[in-house]
Image (spheres, rainbow, N blue to C red):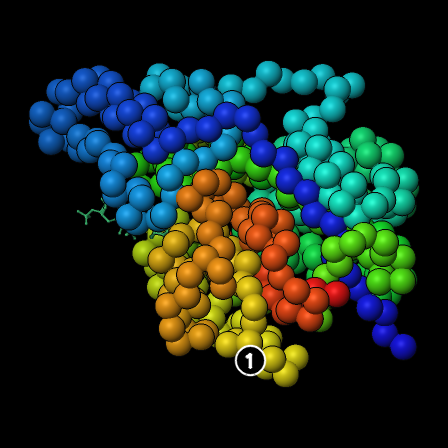
Amino acid sequence: MTTTVVISGTGIYQPEHIITNAELVESYNAYADLQNAKYASDIANGSREALTHSNVAFIEKASGIKQRYVLEKEGVLDPTRMYPRFTPRGNDELSLMAEIAAKAAEQALAAAGKTGADVDMVLCSSANMQRAYPAMAIEIQQAIGAGGFGFDMNVACSSATFGIEQAVNAIKAGTAKCVLMVNPEITSAHLEWRDRDCHFIFGDVCTAVVVEAASTATSVDQWEVLGTKLATQFSNNIRNNFGFMNSAEDTEPDARDKKFQQEGRKVFKEVVPMAASHIETHLASLDRAPQNVRRYWLHQANLGMNQLVLKKLVDREVGNDIAPLILDEYANTASAGSVIAFHAHRSDLQAGDVGVICSFGAGYSIGSVVVKKL
Ligand code: CO8
C-alpha cells in the first residue's frame, strides 16, 4: 500500500526592511552619476560607455515588481557600496542563513502542530549556500532541536519544488517520518545591484514546508501530494560563476560573472513553453486537466511570464484568484516564490480542490507539485 504524503504546515520569515522601486532607482542613478563622473574622460574619448539611468516605470512594466524585502538596506542603497553590509559571525554563533531558516521553520512547525523534536530530516534547499560546509541543514537541524539527518541541495529557483519531491520520496521510502524543507534565500548578497538590467529583480526571504505521512499529520490544514515532477535542461542563460575554484583560477572575486547574470529575454522565451508543457504533462499523468485546477502557485520571476504560462495552459486570461501574484510585494525570491504564493493564498480553498505549485529558473530547472486539499 502506498503511503499518502501531505504538506501539513508552511512558514515564512520576512525581513523587516523594504526597498521600494523609487528608493532603488534613486540609489542606482546616484551610483551611475558617480561612475560617469569618475570615468568622464574615458566616456568622452569613446573608450567607455556612460551608464544610463534606471527607471521605475520600466521596472514595473517589464517585471511587475513594486518593492522587495531585504535583510540589510543601507549598504544596498549606498551608491558608493551597492551590496548589503552583514556583520561576520563567529563559528560559535548561529549563521544568518540558519537563523532565518529557524524562524520560518518555527512557523511551519507550529502550523503543522509539530516541534523540532518531531523532525527527523532537514533539507536546506536554496539557490546559494552561505558556506561550503558543514551543511547549512545540519546547523538548522541543531537550531530547531531535530533528530535524524540533514543535507543541503541547490537547484536555483527550483530548489523548493525539488526539495519537496525529496521529502515526499523519503516519507514514502520510510527513511524519514517528518521532513522540514527550508529555503533561506539571501538573494541580496549575490545580486549585482550595479547592473541596471537586473538590479530590481530579487528580494530576501525564507520559506519552510513540513512534509509527513497523512497517518501522522494532525494539522487542520493538510494538502495531499498527488504527484511531483522534475525536469532539467542545461542553459547558460542564467548563470553565476562564483565558486571555490575562483582563487585557484586567479580570477577577480568582484568580476561581473561572480554574481547573478542572465539573458532575461531568452529566459522568458525559452522557459514559458517549457513550463506550460511540463505542467500539462504532469497533470495529464494524474488524469487532471489544466482547466480544472483551482489554483496555480507559480514561480514568481515575472508577471508577464506567469500570465503567458497560464494562457498556454487554460487558453484564457486568468487573474489573481487562479494564479496569485506575490512578486509585486516580494520581487523574485528565487526558490521561495511559489512557496510564498502557496503559503499566503490557500486558506479559501475547499476540501477536494486541486492546485499546482510550480517553479522554473536557472539550470534550466522546472519542478511541479500537484496537491489536493484534504
Ligand atoms: N531601467 C530602464 N530601462 C531598462 C532597465 C532599467 N532598469 N533595464 C533594461 N532597460 C532597457 C534596456 O536597455 C532595453 O533598452 P533598448 O530596447 O533600448 O535596448 C529595454 O529596457 C528592454 O530591455 P530588456 O529586453 O532586457 O527587457 P525585458 O522587457 O526583457 O525585461 C526582464 C527584462 C524583466 C529581466 C525580463 O526579461 C524577465 O523577467 N525575464 C525572465 C527572467 C527570469 O525568469 N529569470 C529567472 C531568474 S531567477 C533564477 O533562476 C534563480 C537564480 C538564482 C538566484 C540569484 C539571486 C541573486
Residue 12 x, y percent position in the rendering? 64, 40
Q: In this view, does 196 lie to the left or right of 133?
A: left
State the residue at coordinates (46%, 52%). 325
Residue 177 x, y percent position in the rendering? 88, 55
Tell which of 77 and 31 is nearer to you: 77
* The N terminus: image quadrant: bottom right
The residue wearing badge 1 is 289
Q: Can residue 361 be seen in this view?
A: no
Q: Does the residue labelled 1 lie within 8 Å of ligand 1?
A: no
Q: Which residue lies furthest to the left in this view?
A: 45
Q: Can residue 42 be seen in this view?
A: yes
Q: In this view, does 106 lie to the left or right of 200?
A: right
Above/below status of 119 relative to 251: below
Above/below status of 308 relative to 149: below
Tell which of 365 and 164 is nearer to you: 164
Residue 137 x, y percent position in the rendering? 75, 40
* The C terminus: image quadrant: bottom right
Q: Is mark 1 on a helix, strand or loop?
A: loop
Tell which of 47 and 330 is nearer to you: 330
State the residue at coordinates (45%, 57%). 320
